[in-house]
Image (cartoon, rainbow, N blue to C red):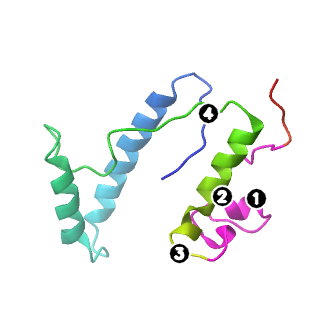
Amino acid sequence: MHLLAQSQTGDLSGIIRDFKHYTSGKFLEELEGPLESRKDWLKMIFEFHAKFKNKQDFQIWTHENHGEHIYSQKFIKQKLDYIHNNPVRAGIVLKPEDYIYSSASNYADQESLIDVIRLDLRWKTI
């Protein structure tokens, strides 16, 4: 998952940690549901990755984050384009806005499954 985020409290690492904890729990709850046909396969994958960390049965998310400080208009545009074009590079869709789990459709003024706060790409860095 790629994400452009900002913390109002200055604790972005804590927010990401809490996000991973919460979503892992929810994912594992859904995995136990009756409609998940890949349950055994997914559990095997998550158990395999958890063996590298003590006191953990499953690992959904990676341990590391690759946060980067956004320092200029050009850099933020580059990161946004990179995120939006990932599904195109992976051969999943032909156009970024066609990937339903992306904010690219928000930026293309199309309907979207997710709500985002669109960046004002007109701001300038001093």
The earlier-in-sequence mark between 2 and 3 is: 3
Give the labeled residue for mark 2. Answer: 103
Q: Quadrant of residue 95?
A: bottom right
Q: Disc 4 marks which amino acid?
A: Gln
Q: Secondary structure at mark 3?
A: loop
The answer to whether the residues at label 3 and label 4 have Cβ atoms under 8 Å apart is: no
Give the labeled residue for mark 3. Answer: 92
Measured in 3D between alpha carbons, the distance from the residue under mark 2 to the one under mark 1, in whole angstroms, is: 7 Å
Measured in 3D between alpha carbons, the distance from the residue under mark 2 to the one under mark 3, in whole angstroms, is: 15 Å
Q: Position of residue 9 (x, y in %)?
A: 58, 22
Q: Residue at x 72, y 46 (%)?
A: 77
As drawn, 10 above or below 102: above
The dot on residue 66 is none
As drawn, 31 above or below 59: below
* Magenta extent: 94-121
Q: Secondary structure at mark 4?
A: loop
